[in-house]
Amino acid sequence: MKTKIILIEDDKKKIEDIKEFLNAEFHYRDLTIKESYQSGLKALIDNEYDLLLLDMSIPTWDKSPVEQGGNYEKFGGYKVLKEVIRKGKPIRTILISMFDDFGESDNSITLTQLDKILKNEFTSIYIGAIFYSSRETKWREELKKVLEQEINR
């Protein structure tokens, strides 16, 4: 696979699972990983990528031994999409989330609802949402199908 992929994700287990999946299914080892809104957006603006694998809920900054990552952005992935469009750096995007609902109680929306919103708002770049669970393999099948379609488009 010659596609240049970036993953914006802060969960270590999910990162490892996605890396292992890409290597096993596509022999892909050149994954760029960014763990926050700021580092992910900077990489997207400063570099050329073909595909973005994006988490919706991400910290503002990278975590470190002395930094907690700033505020946790429940809709950080949405903000990333808004900014890449605004900066003229559109990128094909797949949302991979381990949450099925977002927001606060009365103002929460499901992953299915969020998927529809993103498809309407980011028609030219947004591919779709995949629900990730470390205990299931369905996400792997869904991601493989979407990636094969994307590579062959």
Image (spheres, helix red, strand yellow):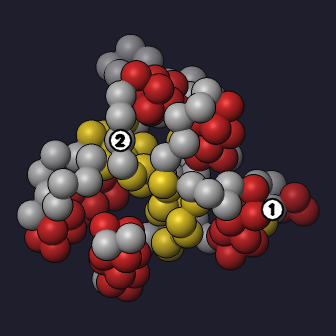
Specify the quadrant that holds the C terminus. Answer: bottom left
Left or right placement of residue 39 versus residue 84 in this view = left
- List the residue tagged with mark 2: 49
What amino acid is at disc 1?
Ser
Pick out the residue farthest to the top: 66
Work out whether residue 66 or residue 5 is closer to the camera in this orientation and state it.
5
Q: How far apart are marks 2 and 1 (CA)?
A: 32 Å
* Residue 130 appears anywhere in the view: yes
Which amino acid lies under the numbered mark 2 shown in the image of this protein? Tyr
Quadrant of the image containing the N terminus? bottom left
Q: Residue furthest right?
A: 106
Residue 17 is drawn in which quadrant?
bottom left
Residue located 54% across and 42% down the image: 90
Mark number displayed over residue 108: 1
Q: Nearer the viewer, residue 148 or 78?
A: 148
Q: How crowded is mark 2: few (under 14 residues within 10 Å), some or many (20 or more)?
A: some
Q: What element carries label 2?
A: loop
Between residue 114 and residue 135, name the one nearer to us: 114
What secondary structure is found at the residue carrying circle 1? loop
Q: In this view, does 22 lie above or below 112?
A: above
Residue 40 x %, y %: 44, 33
Percent coordinates x, y for residue 53 in the rendering? 42, 54
Q: Could one spot residue 76 in this view of the protein?
A: no
Q: Which badge, 2 or 1, is on the more N-terminal residue?
A: 2
